[in-house]
Image (cartoon, rainbow, N blue to C red):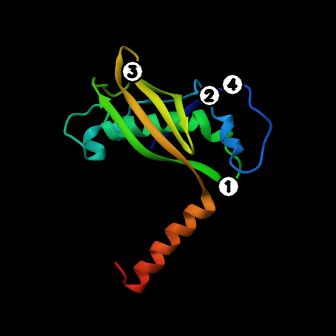
Amino acid sequence: MSTIQLIGAIVRPMPPPETGRAFLDRIVPGQTGMAEIVVGSEHTAPFVGSGRIAVLATPVMINLIEAAALAAVEHLLPAGHQSLGIQLDISHTAATPIGLRVTATAEVAQIEGRTVTFRVTARDEFEPIGGGTHRRVVVSVSRFDERVQRKLTRKKAGAA
């Protein structure tokens, strides 16, 4: 099984660590992350169940786009915080066959509270294949996990 390779991020100078939510000031418009794969059979529509033609599957392109967004900002977050994808508005406009490299780029376009909006693109070796916008929200992992555990507790208790 192949994995997505994070290529890295273009980062502006980072202010010193601060307390509270001030760390969100580290994320600024223009920061960019990239991720890439070489399309293998495990990345195709038939393999992931999204179609019958053996080309890059849209869900895989979206996964690559999310990996690029992570590469842009995740390293700026303090321990105990991470970003979670909350919205995608993506088009997949060109097919990519097995064997071609696909690179996704995510650029921070806007920060509003804890929500980061990215302009995203994906291209293969010959042309753009998709793009749009992606939004992520920064969360406290412990608070997020508490909420998830409450749902599991309700499920075990038989509540719907």
> How much space separates mark 3 and mark 4, taking CA atoms?
27 Å
The residue at the far top in this view is 126
Q: Mark 2 or mark 4: which is in front?
A: 4
Regarding mark 1 in the picture, which secondary structure is present there? Answer: loop
Regarding mark 4 in the picture, which secondary structure is present there? Answer: loop
In the rendering, at what x and y percent does residue 94 appear? 28, 23
> How much space separates mark 2 and mark 1, taking CA atoms?
21 Å
In the rendering, at what x and y percent does residue 43 appear? 36, 38
For residue 80, the mark is 1
Q: Say what amino acid the circle numbered 2 marks.
A: Ala
> How much space separates mark 3 and mark 2, taking CA atoms?
19 Å
Mark earlier in primary sequence (2, 1): 2
**Circle 2 sits on which residue?**
9
Crowding at dot 1, Cα within 10 Å, few <14 / some 14-19 / many 20+, comes out as: few
**Circle 3 sits on which residue?**
124
- The answer to whether marks 2 and 1 mark residues whose Cβ atoms lie closer than 8 Å is no
Q: Mark 3 or mark 1: which is in front?
A: 1
Q: Where 107 falls versus 60 (above or below)?
A: above
Depth order, front residue of 6/20: 20
Q: Residue at x 38, y 39 (%)?
A: 88
Depth order, front residue of 75/117: 117
- The answer to whether marks 3 and 1 mark residues whose Cβ atoms lie closer than 8 Å is no
Q: Residue at x 41, y 25 (%)?
A: 122
Q: Say what amino acid the circle numbered 1 marks.
A: Gly
Q: Is residue 64 visible?
A: no
In the rendering, at what x and y percent does residue 33 appear? 56, 29
- The answer to whether marks 3 and 4 mark residues whose Cβ atoms lie closer than 8 Å is no
Q: In the picture provided, is 47 more to the left or to the right than 61?
A: left
Q: Say what amino acid the circle numbered 3 marks.
A: Asp
Q: In the picture provided, is 123 more to the left or to the right than 83?
A: left
